[in-house]
Image (tube, helix red, strand yellow):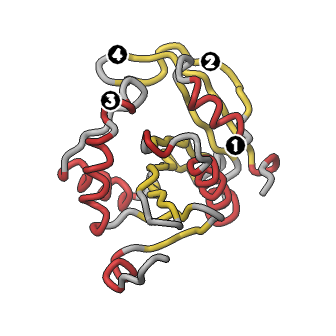
Amino acid sequence: MLKFDPMKAILTHTIARGETVELQLPSVAHKKAFVDFVRRNKQFHEPWVYVRGDPSYFDQYIRRMKSGSMLGFFVFTKKNDEFVGVINLNNIRLDPFGSASLGYYAEEKLCGNGYMKEAIRLVLHHAFQKIGLNRVEVNIQPDNKASIGLSKSSGFIKEGFSKKYLKIGDDYKDHERWAILADDYVI
């Protein structure tokens, strides 16, 4: 059984709860957990995503959220409050596009348990029902079979291929474009 931690309750904000995970908005209370998570999973995340594992990067991440162009979610298990991963809604457009791009990265030792799939569904619900977006895209390197499988099983449909779409590390990488529309989202 989880113990109630009043300091955590004050410093963190749970935005959604599923059966096995909960989404929390990143806050200063998460800095150490985030930095430790990134450092621990560095080799697992690369070459798909490069995230700096230092406290100043975390501060920069929080500033980006405050600018309003992105919204981050930290994923935790409900059972024992383990840090499962990060999901970001990037480039949020509330104009006639009504869109955002989704990015995510997970804890290696917790992969395969369905936590990130459930968390992505919670983020999509938030994006479509709370923010009012029409479309969410995810762009994935073609060799990242695990991420493609996760997106596909979360309801995303492959729309195309973008050559040298995004700089990852030192090089521009090809990406497949996957998307889901609010009209096609099923809870």
Compare marks 1 and 2 and give the one earlier in the sequence.
1
> Of helix, strand and loop, which one carries label 2?
strand
Residue under the point 31% across and 23% down = 169
Residue under the point 49% across and 72% down = 14
Taking 30 as reference, is 84 left or right?
right
The tag on residue 171 is 4
Task: Determine crowd level at label 2: few under 14, some 14-19, many 20+ residues with C-alpha closer than 10 A.
Answer: some
Q: CA distance from mark 1 to mark 4?
A: 28 Å
Q: Nearer the viewer, mark 1 or mark 2?
A: 1
Q: CA distance from mark 4 to mark 2?
A: 17 Å
Residue 53 lies in what quarter of the image? top left
Q: Nearer the viewer, mark 3 or mark 2?
A: 3
Compare marks 1 and 3 and give the one earlier in the sequence.
3
Q: CA distance from mark 1 to mark 2?
A: 19 Å
Is there CB contact under 8 Å for labels 1 and 3?
no
Q: As shown in the figure, which amino acid type bears the numbered disc 4? A: Asp
Q: As shown in the figure, which amino acid type bears the numbered disc 1? A: Ser
Which residue matches tag 1?
Answer: 154
> Of helix, strand and loop, which one carries label 4?
strand
Which residue matches tag 3?
Answer: 43
Compare residues 130 and 57 and report the one nearer the observer.
57
Q: As shown in the figure, which amino acid type bears the numbered disc 2? A: Phe
Task: Determine crowd level at label 4: few under 14, some 14-19, many 20+ residues with C-alpha closer than 10 A.
Answer: few
Which residue matches tag 2?
Answer: 161
